[in-house]
Amino acid sequence: MLPELLQGTDAGGFIIIQDAASYSGRPLLKSFINAALNREEVVHVLGFEVSEEEIKDGLNASSMQRLHFHNGYADPLGWTEQPPFTVHQFSLKELTNVIKQTQQHKPVTLVIDSLSWILRHLSPPAICQSLQQLKKGGAVRTIIGLLHSDMHQRGTVGSVCHLATSVVTVIPGLRGDEAVAKTTRRSKSGKVMQDEEIFSIKEDLTVTVQSKPSHPGTMQTDPEELEADPTANLTFNLRLSDTERKAKEKLALPFVFSKEKKTALLHSGPGSGRILYEPDANDDYDQEDPDDDLDV
């Protein structure tokens, strides 16, 4: 699934690359930038965490005229008189104006490096609203954002990832040059597809998938995430065999009315409704009723 995303199959969507301190997702982010440039798209990068030189390092030099770096790294909070780009410009109106300054009639990809920096200085609801408006506004073709999940509360990460059409979570692999990408992709029809791939990134920023799971389209679950079976270590068996299950289905429960009982109740015969009582020899019947004067 990762090669398909790099080829631009999630056009019109929102891709989140989610990393942590154990493995950086920026090399994969640069691979997405390089792939978009190779498709002759216009790429706008909102850079807050690294410099323009570091972003451009390794990218295709012949495509640099279609890469526009908005420098939020120099003065992200606008402390100088004329900051190049600040966190507070992250809104639909400001971003649309910035993107329209490039008069190129080509698909536009917006790269955010990183969403974590913006989430530290703006409220999550305002950021989610701006991202949702960008997705529907038509100013950009695809949004790609880097998110450091270990820097935020789980609810904040979940709210942002809920807006994404694809979430790629990267973790370190067994070898130094390998990493694992766990991808969750949501189609327009609402179908959710999951995949897990071992990949490596070459010096030219191309991604090579080393191996895929045994069942494509499904996520391999970590052993810690599997729920324990409460019947696994019992000294008796709670499971039914096929023969026992069939016998159970044929068993007539006493509180369930059969057809014969329903017919007898709905179509009662003559004399129904009368109470017939025959005195028993052991009945305690007193001939001298003390309440006899109460009878009317």
Image (cartoon, helix red, strand yellow):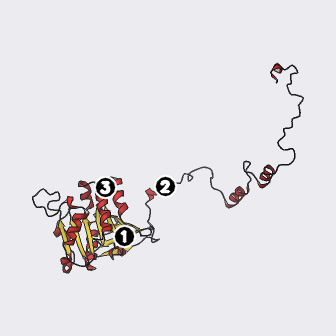
Going from N to C along the chain, the mark reached first, 3 or 1, is: 3
Q: Which residue is mark 2?
A: 227
Earlier along the polypeptide chain: callout 1 or callout 2? 1
Q: What residue appears at the point 17 percent right and 59 percent down from the top-left corner?
A: 76
Q: In which quadrant of the rendered image does the C terminus lie?
A: top right
Residue identifier under label 3: 125
Tag nearer the camera, 3 or 1: 3
Using a 10 Å C-alpha cutoff, classify the residue at mark 1 as few (fewer than 14 neighbours), some (14 to 19) or many (20 or more).
Answer: many
Amino acid type, callout 3 = Pro
Mark 3 and mark 2 lie on one chain; the one further toward the N terminus is: 3
**Residue 282 position (above or below residue 22):** above
Residue 83 falls left or right of residue 201: left
Would you say the residues marked 1 and 2 are in contact, meaning their CB atoms lie under 8 Å apart?
A: no
Q: CA distance from mark 3 to mark 2?
A: 33 Å
- Which circle marks residue 135 in the picture? none
Q: Which quadrant holds the N terminus?
A: bottom left
Task: Give residue 79's position: percent from left, percent from top.
Answer: 12, 56
How much space separates mark 3 and mark 1, taking CA atoms?
34 Å
**Direction from residue 143 to residue 254 in the image, left or right:** right
Q: In front: 234, or 39?
A: 39
Displayed quadrant of residue 30: bottom left
Furthest-left residue in view? 81
Marks 1 and 2 sit apart, C-alpha to C-alpha, by: 25 Å
Q: Which residue is mark 1?
A: 198
Whether residue 36 is visible, yes or no, is yes
Q: Which amino acid, mark 1?
A: Ile
Q: Indicate the position of residue 156 as horizontal and vertical percent values.
A: 33, 55
Tag 2 secondary structure: loop
